[in-house]
Image: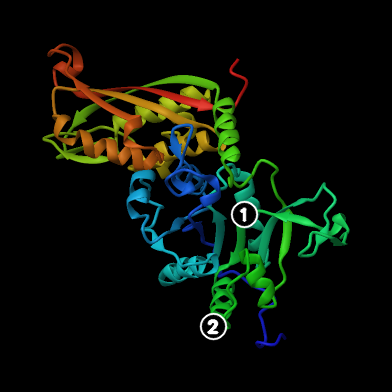
Amino acid sequence: MNALGKTLKTWTPRMRSQPSVAALIVAAGRGTRAGGNVPKQYRSIAGRPLLDRTVEAFRLHDRVARVLVVIGEDDHSFYAAAMTPSDKLLAPVVGGAVRQASVLAGLEALADTAPDIVLVHDAARPFLSAGLIATAIESVSRGALSAVPGLAVVDTIKVVDGDGRVTGTPDRATLRAIQTPQAFAYAALREAHRRAAIAGIAALTDDAAVMEWAGHAVAVFPGEPGNVKLTHPEDFDAAERRMQAAMNDVRVGQGYDVHAFAEGDHVWLGGVRIAHDRGVIAHSDGDVVLHAATDAILGALADGDIGTHFPPSDVQWKGASSDHFLAHAARLLADRGGRLAMLDVTVVCEAPKIGPHREAIRARMAAILGVGLDRIAIKATTSEKMGFTGRREGLAALALATIRLPGDGA
């Protein structure tokens, strides 16, 4: 019991195999200490906006169902230009004048379909790992209301007064430098923020402090030294060097797929349903574009092929959408700390015509893979009426995927 009433000390997630998880990315600040003529979260690192890099870690994580970004009131155009489309990414919400107000705005925006767990993360921390996200989720899944990553303090810390005189030296063994993502039971965090707002408490510097103020215990799990927050110009210079040096294992993989025509009224190409006077013979939906693209990424990873991961003998994949296969390859790439540099696909068929559907296919594949349109190329050709495609017996697709992985470049 605290001064504001009884608080909930334990939490039991709703009965389900896994609790639902949403990520809330705080990006409403101006970041003036970083310099530049745009808010720091929209500055580019190694060719991509900082915010997009940060969000990528969550939208590619298989435990995170939704991602919501809280932005500044005047930042809609910056946001639209920066972000890679994703089915997980919700429309942004506008934050407040201080961090607490921004987080509360985000929490309220999630209320209609409230998650069990919410992860709150700083937009300026792009180097977190998938493992850190998983640890944060598991810490709350096991029953804690709040869990935050922290690093042991290695420097001696001094407390000073307004004149710069030392007034104390705390025991650094009891100190932790706290990072994000911070994980919470969604309902408990929203209630704590609401109460703090009503009480006029607005100067707390992170969400763990809001939970502490509300009387809840906060657990600390090990953070990551590389999970730094970009604040000053030199931080961005270091981040640029880090990104360029880290992603120096460049690989190329190829993929090929073919399906014969059969009775039907449509084909699937690149995740888009296209009307046609024939269908295809296939175990899944027979999408030659997505199958070839999946094999190209798996080839670049040296991780088998589509049949290895999704055996045709497994009945669960009968009639399945090939979106699942390509998304799986993207997750494997993300789990290795890699990213897709380019995917180039050529469709070979006499019909249907690909041109009218090219941009829809590019957009769908970019959404599945979590990359920009500029990383997806779709071309089409015929075989000049030669061979099985020329005889209109089927269609084929060839794909080349270029990926970048962390490594020594050997």
Residue 160 quadrant: bottom right
Q: What is the three-letter code of the residue carrying label 1?
A: Thr
Between residue 154 and residue 397, name the one nearer to us. Answer: 154
Residue 357 quadrant: top left
Horizontal side of residue 163 vs 371, given as left or right:
right
Between residue 100 and residue 139, name the one nearer to us. Answer: 100
Label 2, on which residue?
198
Tell us which disc is closer to us: 1 or 2: 2
Which secondary structure lies at badge 2? Answer: helix
Residue 405 in sight from this viewpoint: yes
Residue 17 in sight from this viewpoint: no
Q: Residue at x 35, y 43 (%)?
A: 367
Work out whether 384 lies above or below 140: above
Horizontal side of residue 178 vs 265, given as left or right:
right
Task: Indicate the quadrant containing the C terminus: top left, top right, bottom left or bottom right.
Answer: top right
- How many marks the image carries: the answer is 2
Label 1, on which residue?
180
Which dot marks residue 275?
Answer: none
Labels 1 & 2 near each other (Cβ < 8 A):
no
Q: Residue at x 44, y 30 (%)?
A: 340
Task: Indicate the quadrant containing the N terminus: top left, top right, bottom left or bottom right.
Answer: bottom right
Which secondary structure lies at badge 1? Answer: loop
Direction front: furthest residue: 163
Coordinates of residue 15 in the picture (x, y in percent)? 56, 69
| Spatial CA span between label 1 and label 2 | 25 Å
Q: Residue at x 14, y 34 (%)?
A: 356
Label 1: how many Cα within 10 Å (few below 14, some 14–19, many 20+):
many
Coordinates of residue 291 in the picture (x, y in percent)? 35, 30
Between residue 285 and residue 193, name the one nearer to us. Answer: 193
Coordinates of residue 251 in the picture (x, y in percent)? 49, 20
